[in-house]
Image (cartoon, grey):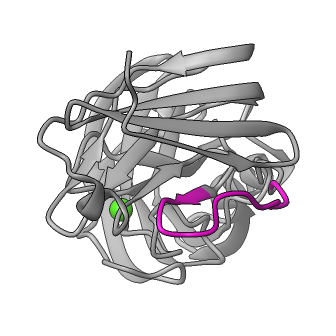
Amino acid sequence: MKLSTLRAFQYKSFKVVYFIYMSSIMIVFRGTIQLGRYFYHSASQVRRMSEVSVLVPNYYVPIYYRSIEEVSVARSWLQLSLHCIMVDFAGKQSFWKALKPPAKDKCGELLSSLCYHPSNSILTLTLIKARNLKAKDINGKSDPYVKVWLQFGDKRVEKRKTPIFTCTLNPVFNESFSFNVPWEKIRECSLDVMVMDFDNIGRNELIGRILLAGKNGSGASETKHWQDMISKPKQTIVQWHRLKPE
Ligand SMILES: [Ca+2]
């Protein structure tokens, strides 16, 4: 096989090699790396490839982008998410770059309020704002919105969504959702609150979530919030929660 071009980029824990052959490109990873998803960017297109999750010493990713000439590759780059690595095809042929550890615990925080009126059985969740959300896009931002499921036990019964707030890590939602929950059911129901990143390409991704519940909430602050709501009916209880990755 005659390769028209061979270049390699050295990283601390792995090496990326790409070949351009017959107007196609093939990416080769050597080292030990876990890949989440990867994107190929050029002046005219952004393509997200299928998700890969593998830990191997030698991993060959056959990405065949047809009709790519070397001049256009020089203006393109490959994004490997999960480890936030950028491979700049126009850069130096060999260089070192520190890998960022996956910031699994830093999903951001959500300010919300809960209020329950036993007389008319209305449970109101207000999503006020979020701060320091995890960046999911290549521009270092996200396009957050919140998806909420009302659950009885394990059963999801009602879904609500906020609008999408583009290109921000500190959205102000100011959105209230009311649910009809009889008093005798309030202890067994819960709210699954998911902060999502909207994407034009592919599926929207979870930034972080909390489960607001009287028992088995996603954390101590979530459980306390629910119990405070029940013990102080008709009062609006406001609390910050740290978002969880899963
Ligand atoms: Ca996005």
Q: Is residue 96 magenta?
A: yes
Relative placement, left or right, of 207 versus 176 is right
- Towards the viewer: 125 or 230: 125
Q: Is residue 64 above or below residue 233?
A: above
* Quarter occupied by the N terminus: top left
Q: Which residue is depicted at the point 34% across and 28% down?
A: 63
Q: Position of residue 31 (x, y in %)?
A: 79, 27
Q: Is residue 42 magenta?
A: no
Q: Is residue 29 above or below residue 230?
A: above
Q: Is residue 55 visible?
A: no
Q: Quadrant of ligand 1?
A: bottom left
- Towards the viewer: 58 or 100: 58
Q: Position of residue 119 (x, y in %)?
A: 39, 57
Q: Which residue is depicted at the point 88% across and 47% down?
A: 12
Relative placement, left or right, of 94 versus 20 is right
Which stretch did the figure color magenta? Answer: 86-99
Q: Which residue is depicted at the point 74% across and 29% down?
A: 33
Q: Position of residue 213 (x, y in %)?
A: 64, 40
